[in-house]
Amino acid sequence: MSKSITVRYFALFRENAGTSEEKLSLDVATAADLYEQLQHRHGSLDARAHCKVAINDEMSAWDAPLADGDVVLLFPPVAGG
Amino acid sequence: MQMTDKPIRPDELRDLLMDKTAGAYCSFEGWIRNRNDGHAVERLEYEAYCPLAIIEGEKVIAEAKKRFPGLQAHCVHRYGMLEIGECAVWVGVSSEHRDEAFVACRYIIDEVKSRLPIWKKEYYADGNSGWVNCERCAAHAAHD
């Protein structure tokens, strides 16, 4: 069953996707599933191990389940300091 | 934890950590330098997702305080366009003795660099620009 997911991209991901946010209807169970589908869609995301994900403004694990209406933030490798 | 688009003033921040029980103060300042990986850098742009950067930064500071009871700690990170020589991040801690001050300060800056949703884009003298990939920061924190 497909879910309505809002995806927000940051830094390099935003430039690669050409947008900071998109609303998608996807058949995905977890954040990892979403990432995999978006890799096919944009073909330019980094290896997942170096990236982070937040769901509804909370840092999450890649195996966290997604619900209809979730807002998923995709963070490329961070580089503060 | 504080995120700001204004210049960081370490002297004013240091005063916030003054405490009669503290015998030690340690701070770290991260500055914008003019070279990275052999490229001449002209300026740096920091992008941050502030709501989560603040939450994650508070967690890092809480972890340090839990490890060293009595520790006072504060961290400020800039975002936006920064010029060479500007302070991008400041960490300050005060504690009873110097050992925990050094260790806690080091812990906070390493975790801040590897965990907070902050990214930097370098603008080079040759007109190119590029996002800095900080995998080595994460590797460093993992070894600490």
Image (cartoon, rainbow, N blue to C red):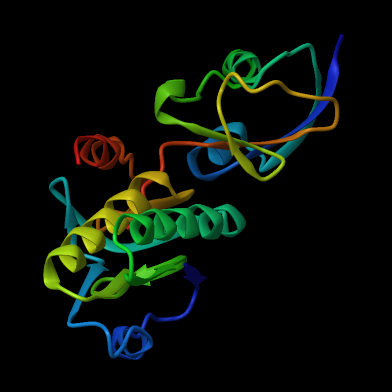
B104 and A66: which is toward the camera: B104
Q: Quadrant of residue B27?
A: bottom left
Q: Which of the image's four quarters has the N terminus of chain A?
A: top right
**Total numbered labels placed on residues in the image:** 0
Q: Where residue B17 sits in the image (x, y, percent)?
A: 34, 83
Residue drawn at the location 41% of the way across and 37% of the way down: A77
Along the horizontal axis of the image, is B119 left or right of A15?
A: left
Q: Which of the image's four quarters has the C terminus of chain A?
A: bottom left
Q: Where residue B142 sits in the image (x, y, percent)?
A: 26, 35
Residue drawn at the location 54% of the way across and 36% of the way down: A13
Residue drawn at the location 50% of the way across and 68% of the way down: B3
Q: Where residue A11 sits in the image (x, y, percent)?
A: 51, 45
Classify B48 as above or below B114. below
A23 and B38: which is toward the camera: A23
Residue A29 seen by the camera? yes
Classify B117 as above or below A33. below
Residue B88 seen by the camera? no
Residue drawn at the location 37% of the way across and 56% of the way down: B66
Q: Quadrant of residue A17?
A: top right
B1 and B85: which is toward the camera: B1
Along the horizontal axis of the image, is B22 left or right of A12?
A: left
Q: Where residue B10 sits in the image (x, y, percent)?
A: 30, 83
Along the horizontal axis of the image, is B42 left or right of B65?
A: left
Classify A61 as above or below B37. above
Along the horizontal axis of the image, is B39 left or right of B11?
A: left
